[in-house]
Amino acid sequence: MRSALREQYDAHALRADLMAGVVVGVVALPLSMALAIASGVPPQHGLYTAIVAGLVIALLGGSAVQVSGPTAAFVVILAPIAARFGLGGLLVATLAAGVILFAMGATGMGQFIEYVPYPVTTGFTAGIAVVIGTLQLKDFLGLTVPRMPEHYLERLGALLKALPTVRMADVAIGALTLAVLTLWPRVNRRVPAPLVALTLAALAAAVVAKTMPGFSVATINTRFAYESGGVLRPGIPRDPPRPVLPWRLPGPDGAPLRVNLDLLRELMPAAFAIAM
């Protein structure tokens, strides 16, 4: 930021950055909630993470030209951690990953990333795409799965068993969204396709639901709820989150996480996976 100001950062650059920030924010916020859901945690946690991380990266990042936002690559890593250790365990593993990254940077070990074979990186990325694409079938088809297993093949089996519960309304909106994402870049590249797809799909779902009885699509408001003042309310919390230590958050059984050496030992492989 200081270097940008020294280089005579003017009003024109500010307007351009504001417009870019609005577009990225509009796209990143629903994306962050979607990735939180895919990772097995309530959507508001993805929202909080995108806001806080975006501010921190913008202020502390080492480049004057950067765009930060949520990434789908971590879904494959975070989902099993959340399923096994709960939200509290996921955050403890994330903190441990930060410590590992800091230690690697301080000791110069980060340079060894240059020796990772390119086919390994490509295969890892392709595998992530396959897993994420498969897991999205549940929401794309509107399937009813009582409990999603932890491992990929077991999840695939659960999805196949749930095929009779397909909801055509969800399929229609999902197909519309996918079509816009695919075709819009051929029409206009200045306006991001996710922004157009999100707007059109939301409007279509709202209009059709009012004009066609029986047509209903699952939304954040209908699928998720939060507790406030002892009352269960639909959607996501309206108030900002209160600061809380990770180990005071619920574990896999819903009770506050108990941090001990055994838990830390079990979380270390997950922390290394996040750091790497």
Image (tube, rainbow, N blue to C red):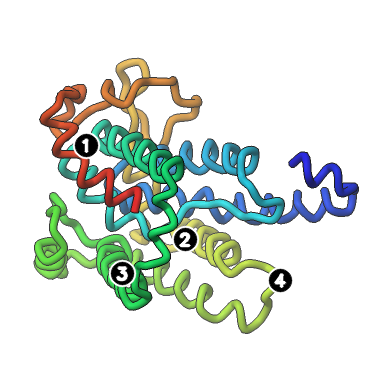
Q: Name the residue beneath numbered marker 4.
A: 190
Instruction: Give the quarter of the image for residue 169.
Output: bottom left
Reading the chain from its start, which is encountered first: label 4 or label 1?
1
> Relative to residue 233, is residue 240 drawn left or right?
right
Instruction: Give the quarter of the image for residue 141.
Output: bottom left
The residue depicted at 60 percent of the width and 52 percent of the height is 26
> Relative to residue 42, is residue 183 drawn left or right?
right
> Relative to residue 175, is residue 165 drawn left or right?
left
Cβ atoms under marks 2 and 3 closer than 8 Å: no
In which quadrant of the rendered image does the C terminus lie? bottom left
Q: Which marked residue is nearer to the observer: mark 2 or mark 3?
A: 3
Reading the chain from its start, which is encountered first: label 2 or label 4?
4
Q: Name the residue beneath numbered marker 3.
A: 124
> Looking at the picture, which amino acid does disc 1 mark?
Gly
Secondary element under disc 4, as helix, strand or loop, is loop
Reading the chain from its start, which is encountered first: label 2 or label 3?
3
Instruction: Give the quarter of the image for residue 127.
Output: bottom left
The dot on residue 86 is 1
**Distance from label 1 to label 3 (Cα)?**
25 Å
